[in-house]
Amino acid sequence: MERTRTRLGAAVFLMLILGHLGNALEVPLDPKVLEELAQPPTITQQSPKDYIIDPRESIVIHCEAKGKPHPSFSWTRNGTHFDIDQDPKVTMRPRSGTLVVDISGEKAETYEGIYQCTARNKHGAAVSNNIVIRQSRSPLWSKERNEPIRVQEGEALVLHCRPPAGLPPPIIFWMDVNFQRLPQSSRVFQALNGDLYFSNVLKEDSRNDYICYARFPHTQTIQQKQPITLLVLNLDAVNETVAALFNETDLFSDGLAEERKPTFLIPSGSSSSKMVLRGQVLELECITEGLPTPEVSWSKLSGEFPDKRTSIVTFQKILRIVNVSDADAGEYRCTAHNRLASVHHTIRVTVKAAPYWLTTPRNLVLAPKEKGQLICRASGTPKPTINWAMNGIPIENSPEDPNRKVEGDTIIFEEVQTGSSAVYQCNASNEYGYLLSNAFVNVLSETPRVLTPANQVYQVIRNNHALLDCSSFGSPIPKITWFKDSQSSTLEGDPYLLHENGTLEIYVAQALNSGKYICVARNTLGIAENHVYLEVKEPTRILKQPKYKVAQRNRNVVFECKVKHDPTLIPIMIWLKDNGELPDDERFLVDSDSLTITDVTENDAGTYTCIMNTTLDHDSASAELTVVEQPDPPTDLELTDMKPRSVQLTWIPGDEHNSPIHKFVIQYTDSLHDHGHWHNLTHVPGSKTTAHLELSPYVHYSFRVLALNAVGLSDPSNPSHMYKTNPAAPDENPSGVKGFGTEHDNLMILWKPMSGLQANGPGLQYKVMWRKKDVDKNWTSVTVANVSKFMVSGTPTFTPYEVKVQAINNNGIGPDPVVVTGHSGEDLPVQAPDNVQVLVLNSTLAEVHWEPVPPKTVRGHLKGYKVYYWRERSLHKHNPHRVEKQLLTFSGNKSHGMLPGLQPYSLYLFNVMVYNGKGEGPASSNLQFETPEGVPGRPSFLRITNSNLNNLTLEWGPPNDLNGHLTGYILKYQQVNNSNELGPMEELALPANKTSITLPNLKYSTRYKFYFNAKTGQGAGPVITEEAVTIMDEAMPSRQVDIATQGWFIGLMCAIALLILVLLIICFIKRNKGGKYPVKEKEDAHTDPEFQPMKEDDCTFGEYSDTEDHKPLKGSRTPSNGTVHRDSSDDSLVDYGGGDGQFNEDGSFIGQYSGKSSIRETAEGPSPVNTTAMNSFV
């Protein structure tokens, strides 16, 4: 991961560059420094050396320079001083050397010449290049009259353009009178000089509008040559013309032009030479004529063409090499050939070079007594000459300086002196051009200053490089030292590295390297320091990278990208697709740590990259999405190797859509028997594209292929051509043959008809054959049409037969059929089971036994036995007589069965019969049995009919199902208090003839739960439960009021109030100290109602109410007579509490009684005792 660091940019400062001998330095570009430092002039902008001007506009010759103080400007023209004050048309821009020449009313030629600018201040003078000013020219074509050109067909031709000379040269192109470019080819083409060449002319080249155009780019004007008319004559026309003139016939033997070998038109001969300057464009031209049209090719005899710089254009006629280098020199061969011959031309290319820089002289800033040097090195062909000048004057004519020595391309300075600042010019020139460069030597004495902004904060990622800048300036060059925090020792050695420009590098930054750093710059004139800060941050890491996904089209895909980063850095998550932005599609949903693509399409496939960027670093991870779908259908189905019973099918697979094809499914349709319905024939692995198909006779086949991959089946391919097989005898017989009777005297023979595909030919019939099994030897047969059954009549009842069915068509019979055994029709059984007996196992279960009937009497397939039984009556005489028949079926040849679910103490009747596929046989005689006693059912009702202060009356009804002789009842009851706690159980045994009872000596205002059931000699039956509440004593309210008005009672209440106040204060104090105290446990529901229990959670006293004592359990129903009916005998605590039941922290159940007792209205409200007691506390 690349290191990212905070920087302020080049506008703040430029780091020092130490590239010369000695202690040479450069003046930084910091504006604050530049304002204070003296500096010789430096040219910053100038016009090009060759400056072509537009005569319609003012001439602007640029010359800009900088320096301290700001320089003044002067110009020379053609080597002499140009006094701009003497020419009113010429002005110089303020604080600039740029000239503006107003040529309105003047000829531009007046100001053509060679200009040079000089920028000067007291520290030296800098000069510009020689700027050659020339006016652009676009002269008109000279008037001429072009005679029509007549040429014989097949001859070579050149149409000359010869445009007027312009500055710069014009661009040439040929067009017709409609301004449409003339078509060019290897036969007709334009040469570099603008002429139009014909290797050979054809009749269709005749036209009267060959026009040459010249476009002058500087003035954006186009000049046009007069149209040229070309007439191409064939040999027949020449014969006629000559014959008319000379009275001769058939001068030329035939009308075909004579073929010619290739000949070079440009360049001529077998060899030529070409010179090109380094860096320019080399264009070699090879123009030939001949018939047929010659083809041109190029080669380099001394090497290969440069790959990226070479092109062959204009129908192979021109070889072009751009940005020519010395390596492009050598011999190039042009070869032209047609079917008659091949010719060659060799071009020897030499490369010359105008001067170009190797080392450009650079500005020097030196302190007094320092040394340095200016180096000016250039190359070219021929080698350029180096000339030095100082402040624009040749150095040999400048004042001598004993501390300066010129050695060719180098000037060496030794112990420079104050006041020796100057600008030196280096001129490198040869016959092809020159180079001019200015470089100043500035001798300064400056105290150190640190250019890096103060209190700069650098942030780096842990384990990366940290570079702390200390850009400084001073003359002599200051020495840089670094300190950290309050340490007095300099930072040297591992892990620190001090660079020559003052930058402190920490190769592997760690958290302990964070802190304040002090940079100190010293020279002989003073000292300066600066403080910077380093913050080392944790790296950004992707913890959960996105994973490779394979998705079906129209499904959703989620790429996860969970990242950890330094908490002080602001992260930005970016997602890319194939290294580009995500598509502008609402289906792409970017979340903080994921990318969701909904309804995926094939275009969504690619590589997805999540990039987490911070201001310092980033981390990225990529995953590929492959979108799959069912393959495209196969194409180009072809049938080969066609035989009577087989064919070879081949096809071309469709696109797999990124999911390999597992197999190909071959289907067929039979247009003869089942047109339009397709059936699976076979399948082959996905690696195969051919299948050998076994066929059936007499079928008109068409095939199609489907491809299957992990996504699903493709659409079917287009059907193949139809292939018809010849008919043949059947290969198989009908399946599903069976014989059975529908009546007692017939035999129905049934089979599954054969399809047209199975028939193998026309005229399908069936030969049906049957005989009695183990009786007849010969088969009875009949041939029937294409049906599926045949009825044999007059058969004995339920007799076994052997049957078979054979297929026949017009081409023969099928193979021997399989023999199947069936039976003629069934009849009802004729005999009832004998020796029927019954064994009563208990009051609800009995077992029946019988003797199976003889098989012959069944007269059919034995299905089983049926037992019909019914309850005749109860053994109680008063019970009504009821007959409800019930049926039990016992499949197979059984001899006994169980009768479950019987009613106790009852009389039952039953009989037994056999049955077959036809129906039931006769029943056995009815037999009876009695079931013994059982336990009784639950009593029909239980209700409380009277509720008094201390007694309750209960009434009940006997059970609906006595199930024997009732011997009595059992009554159990118990109290239920406010805590839903159950009291001790009381039990009473009651006689069978009793239907009510009054329970005396009960507790007033108390809830009771009752459990009641009946019993016989076999035991007690199920329990019915109810609940009821005794009423309150009406005398209690008056007594309570009287007590409340007594003086002793009032005194007692005041004492209790005072005690409560003291307890509250103590509780409050202890609570503030964090103590916990035991409290009095909750009082029983029947304790003194005047005592108020204290709540444990807040040390306050809760209200006491006996309302709870008069509420029935939640979930119960209270009728208007005060009784409580229960739906079941379940006495779990949950029933008492209903849905609102809760449990205390100690696990005890909390429940509220709900419901309403109508015995007294006061039972629903709080007791008067409680009301008075509460009032007494107020």
Image (cartoon, helix red, strand yellow):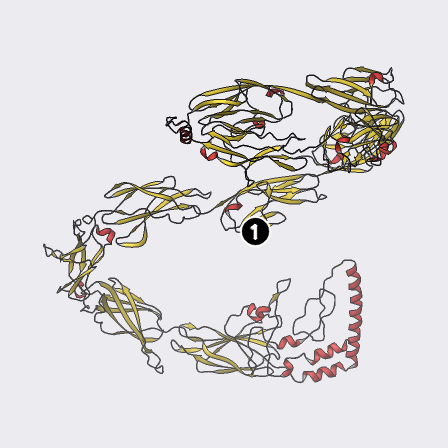
Q: Quadrant of the N terminus?
A: top right
Asked if residue 21 can be seen in this view, the reply is: no
Question: Would residue 745 be found to the left or right of residue 580 on screen?
Answer: left
Q: Give the residue drawn at x 64%, y 25%.
A: 280
* Residue 668 image position (x, y, % from top left): 31, 49
Query: Tag 1's secondary structure?
Result: loop
Q: Amino acid at mark 1?
A: Arg
* Residue 219 image position (x, y, % from top left): 68, 36
Toward the viewer: 799 or 864?
799
Q: Give the residue drawn at x 53%, y 46%.
A: 604
Asked if 808 appears above or below 536 in the picture, the reply is below
Toward the viewer: 279 or 504?
279
Asked if 695 appears above or below 139 in the picture, the reply is below
Asked if 371 appears above or below 699 in the picture, the reply is above
Q: Which residue is mark 1?
A: 587
Asked if residue 1131 can be seen in this view, the reply is: yes
Dot 1, crowdedness within 10 Å: few (<14), some or many (≥20)? few
Quadrant for residue 84, please give it.
top right
Toward the viewer: 203 or 944?
203
Q: Quadrant of the C terminus?
A: bottom right
Question: Would residue 11 be found to the left or right of residue 464 on screen?
Answer: right
Q: How many marks?
A: 1
